[in-house]
Image (cartoon, rainbow, N blue to C red):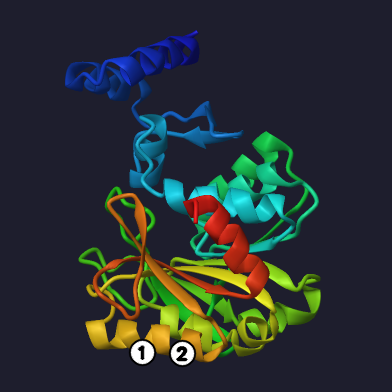
Amino acid sequence: MKDYFIRVLLQIYKTKKSTKLRTIIKTFLKDRKIDLKYRSFSVNVSSSSAVELKVLFDEYDEAIILNLIELYSRNNYNFIDIGANIGLHSLTAASSNPNIEIFSFEPEPTNFQDFLNNITLNKFKSIRPFMMGLGNVIKNETLYINEAWNKGKHSLKNQFSTNSKVVIPISTLDTFENNINSSDLFVKIDVEGYEKEVIEGAINVLSNTKDIVLSIELVSGNNEAQACQDIINIIMSYGFEKLYKIKDSKLIEVSKYEESADYILIKGDQSKALFNELIGN
């Protein structure tokens, strides 16, 4: 009964963005989880983490990336999710096309369990979840845990004041190359400063795939601006031809790293044609 009441309040909130109503919803929910319909799938969320709170109040700010994932998934691009968190991107791909293959990597145990719960909630069969990180060598590494409310900020590079940490396995994307059965791929990388290591361990996959789209978060707070540019240079050396950044909910074509943002890199005539379809060119 309480879940039903919360859903009713959320529907009212969508039409009347009231701070008071928002507080009431959070008070009723507290740390409890509730199943909600989001886009074309269901997700189990609470108000205790940044990503889940944004989903709860329909404020999740990666709509462009999710739209791209939907577009390419519908056109039979397999999806690789590096830094899956609770799985929104992987769930988007699975709900868009049940016939594609989805490889998802999330090393933090709590996020991973929430991700598994969301897969089960939707009864998706196409997602292959791995509780591990990706990098440029196979080893064990220390993951520093962000105990604050943004549970997507766990990092292999940045330590936090609580010094909470866990040892996780690291592999490389190229280790999985023989299992990725498609020449068409969409790859998403969100790894809080470990981007260079990930792409160095993905030389074969990124170089050998004819049509591929890569979404990568580059933040100067995790890497200096020059390091972010170096990451883009490495990716472009794998044969990528187009570079865009997402700013103010728009895709803007650029020639280099400009500022902290999500960047989209594209390779292959088919990938470019589908992208142009989305942006209306």
- Badge 1: residue crowd in 10 Å (few <14, some 14–19, many ≥20): some
Out of 119 and 27, give the one closest to the viewer.
Answer: 119
At x 24%, y 71%, the residue is: 259
Q: Secondary structure at mark 1?
A: helix
Q: Are marks 1 and 2 in contact (CB under 8 Å)?
A: yes
At x 25%, y 75%, the residue is: 258
Can see residue 64? yes
Q: What's the CA distance linking mark 1 and mark 2?
A: 6 Å
Locate residue 27: give its quadrant: top left
> Looking at numbered disc 1 in the image, what kind of residue is underneath it?
Asp
Left or right? Give the position of 215 relative to 171: left
Q: How many marks?
A: 2
Residue 245, label in figure: none
Determine the residue located farthest toward the front in the rendered image: 281
- Badge 2: residue crowd in 10 Å (few <14, some 14–19, many ≥20): some
Residue ID for mark 2: 234
Residue 16, position as x, y percentages in the image: 27, 15
Residue 144 sits above or below residue 28 on the image: below
Locate residue 166: give its quadrant: bottom left
Out of 276 and 193, give the one closest to the viewer.
Answer: 276
Left or right? Give the position of 269 relative to 256: right
Out of 206 and 251, give the one closest to the viewer.
Answer: 251
Can see residue 90? no
Out of 28 and 55, give the one closest to the viewer.
Answer: 55
Residue 93, position as x, y percentages in the image: 64, 50
Left or right? Give the position of 27 relative to 44: left
> Looking at numbered disc 2 in the image, what kind of residue is underneath it?
Ile
At x 77%, y 46%, the residue is: 98
Residue ID for mark 1: 230
Left or right? Give the position of 145 relative to 120: left
